[in-house]
Image (cartoon, rainbow, N blue to C red):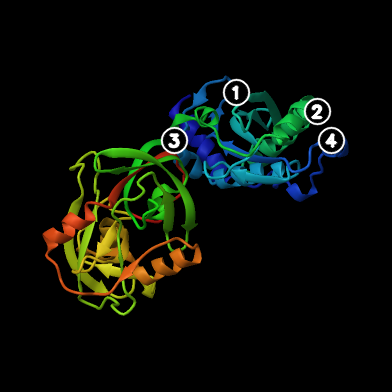
Amino acid sequence: MRLYHVFLLFILFSVSACVSKPINISTIQADKKILAAIPYDLDASIYVAVPYLEDKGGDTVKITKYEAFKKVGVLSELEKSVEEVAKKYFTHVSLFSPDKKAKLYIIFSGRFTTEQLIGSLTAYVKGTVYDADGNFLYEKEVSGIEVTGGRLNNASLYNAVVKAQVDFYNQFFQEKLGDLYRAKSIEKQFINKVYSKLPSDRVRATATASGFLINKKGQMLTNHHAINGCLDVSVQLNGKDKKATVIHIDEELDLAVLNTAFAKMPHAYFSSNNNKPRLGEDVVVVGFPLQGVLTSKPSLTTGNISALAGIKDNESIYQITAPVQSGNSGGPMLNNAGMVIGIIQSKLNAVRIAKYTGDVPQNVNFAVKYDKVLDFLSKNKVPHSQRKFKRKISTPDIADKVSKYVVGVSCKGYVEILNRKYDL
């Protein structure tokens, strides 16, 4: 397709008058006979692949990246429609994420074809269904047609997709009820077989972070954003690589506790509540920045607490001057007695700030305060230990101690296509 055709499609999507009005999904009613036959307590996890456009001759417009479709303002609406339509048929519905277990996994992909001469848009939606054991259940491509009057808008896309989905579910439940009763009895889980079917452009091979052991059980702390949406999490300590599982999270504080196989190993001690950090206090940061580029062994930087609150007076955060890089997320921040007083979370995006202020900020980084971490651990009954400040020890001695319990974190899994909240 020629470039001006692609440009025309974008203009039509973004500025043309609203010929179509969005379907009110609340008015859609699933077939009563189908609903009566669907097993109770049947849930689904749904993955939505990036759609693409075709012209009437079948030439593909190469819009395959999420951001490109985002420009025409329709992707969030499509994902919302997928979730809302599915709720007509299932007891519980969630958009795909490896940490959301289900009894059915549905992968949707699709394409749009425009017939501008007759003023219509057709959405072709292919759905593939797997049970929780990763067994293939069903696959079919269906279509939904929307009359556009020759002028496309977001509602045209939305309506065509909604119509196609309703058709897909009606056919699916009519043809596969027997398999659904068997799927209902399978324990909820997430299987690699399903993960391997996802389009590769929305899967990351590996992302890295840091963490540290906090008790003799081998449980560890890291940032929630470091493991969010991960299919497989592994941790590295002293050259050994072990699987880890997430057991507790707090999205607001950006914290996560993981179980690891590193039981009965040295672990961190948190500072006593009587030794609250002060403005200007020296800090030591240990972690695994830029894994795969820098050393595979722990790295150490030093600085001080430059503010007792974060951006917009966030009282859960310290601002620090110790240099940190991508991969430091989740690593411990210690005082000069070697006790943990915070967890590295993020750094200020210097390029972004420079655009607004004309000045490049230097060493503006952030760590979650240790008292917030302790509250999180106590709330979830995770064993941990505190010690009173006894005496200062040298930075090399701190490095020796921390190196025995700081771990590298590797995440393999699904990436939500959202703006990242953190820069580490």
Which residue is more in the foreground, 424 or 3? 424
Whether residues under marks 1 and 4 lie with C-beta atoms below 8 angstroms apart, the answer is: no
Give the x, y percent position of residue 7.
Answer: 47, 36
Label 2 with label 3: CB-CB less than 8 Å: no
What is the secondary structure assignment of the residue under circle 3?
strand
Residue 320 sits in quarter: bottom left
- Label 1 amino acid? Lys
Marks 4 and 2, how far apart at CA: 9 Å
Q: Gap between marks 2 and 3, in whole Å?
A: 33 Å
Q: How far from the left and from the top, in percent, is residue 414?
A: 46, 39
Which residue is label 4 attached to?
A: 37
Secondary element under disc 1, as helix, strand or loop, is loop
User: In the displayed structure, does residue 89 sit left or right of residue 125?
Assistant: right
Return the residue nearer the eye: 329 or 11: 329
Per the rendering, the mark at residue 56 is 1
Name which of mark 1 and mark 4 comes first in the sequence: 4
Mark identifier at residue 203 = 3
- Contact (Cβ within 8 Å) of mark 1 with mark 2: no
Identified by mark 2, the residue type is Gln
Please state if 405 lies on the left or on the right of 37 as rendered: left
Q: Earlier in the sequence, mark 1 or mark 3?
A: 1
Q: Are marks 1 and 3 in contact (CB under 8 Å)?
A: no
